[in-house]
Image: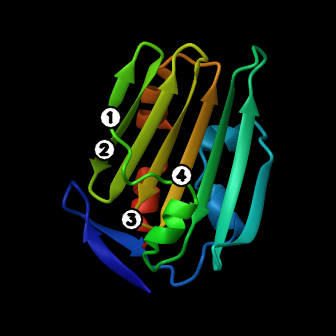
Amino acid sequence: MAVELLSDQGAPEAVQVASTLLEKEALVQLLPAWMHEEGVNFYFERAEVMGESVTRCRGRYLWEDGAQMEYELTDVGPTLKLDLIKGLGFNFDQENTESESGYTSAYELKEGVLLNHEYDEAAGEGSLQVLVNGRFLLEVQLEGFEADAFEDVLENHLPLDELLRLL
């Protein structure tokens, strides 16, 4: 089944309504294109979490200097399950804090997209958790990166538009 939404330019966009969990190929294709081009191996699983089925896909890229980036995309299904999302680690109550060693932030990136962001400057590592439409939890772990690398990830490496089209 498909419904249509208007894009920013006013042209209709098809929205796929998936009434079941996405399977391996669909999840893998939502991970960044550069990871596919670099030959990253992706791990896929169908798992039971808190008595509910989820599907998830994970890929990790390691640079020669030891820096690494890991993406994990989890589909909790088309029905909103706040307890399950919390059980997967998304913190709906995260507060914005800043200290000498780093920061945490939480905000609505755009309609339907909640973002939790943590960064430890001393360790050069941090994470992003992005909840899209209450269905998809995208987690990005960066190690060996400066804080501004997160801006690049947010702007260029998250499949938000694709995920927003999937209900």
Specify the quadrant that holds the N terminus.
bottom left
Residue position marked by numbered label 1 in the rendering: 96
Residue position marked by numbered label 4 in the rendering: 138
Q: Amino acid at mark 3?
A: Asn
Residue position marked by numbered label 3 in the rendering: 133
Q: Earlier in the sequence, mark 2 or mark 4?
A: 2
Q: Which mark is residue 107?
A: 2
Q: Earlier in the sequence, mark 3 or mark 4?
A: 3
Q: Give the SS element for disc 3.
A: loop
Q: Residues within 10 Å of mark 3 (few under 14, many from 20)?
A: some
CA gap between label 1 and label 4 equals: 20 Å
Residue 95: image x %, image y %?
Answer: 34, 40
- Depth check: give the residue in front, 45 or 161: 45
The residue located at (49%, 46%) in the rendering is: 129
Whether residues under marks 1 and 2 lie with C-beta atoms below 8 angstroms apart, the answer is yes
Residue 25: image x %, image y %?
Answer: 69, 65
Whether residues under marks 3 and 1 lie with C-beta atoms below 8 angstroms apart, the answer is no
Quarter location, residue 144: top right
CA gap between label 1 and label 2 equals: 9 Å
CA gap between label 3 and label 1 equals: 22 Å
Q: Amino acid at mark 2?
A: Tyr
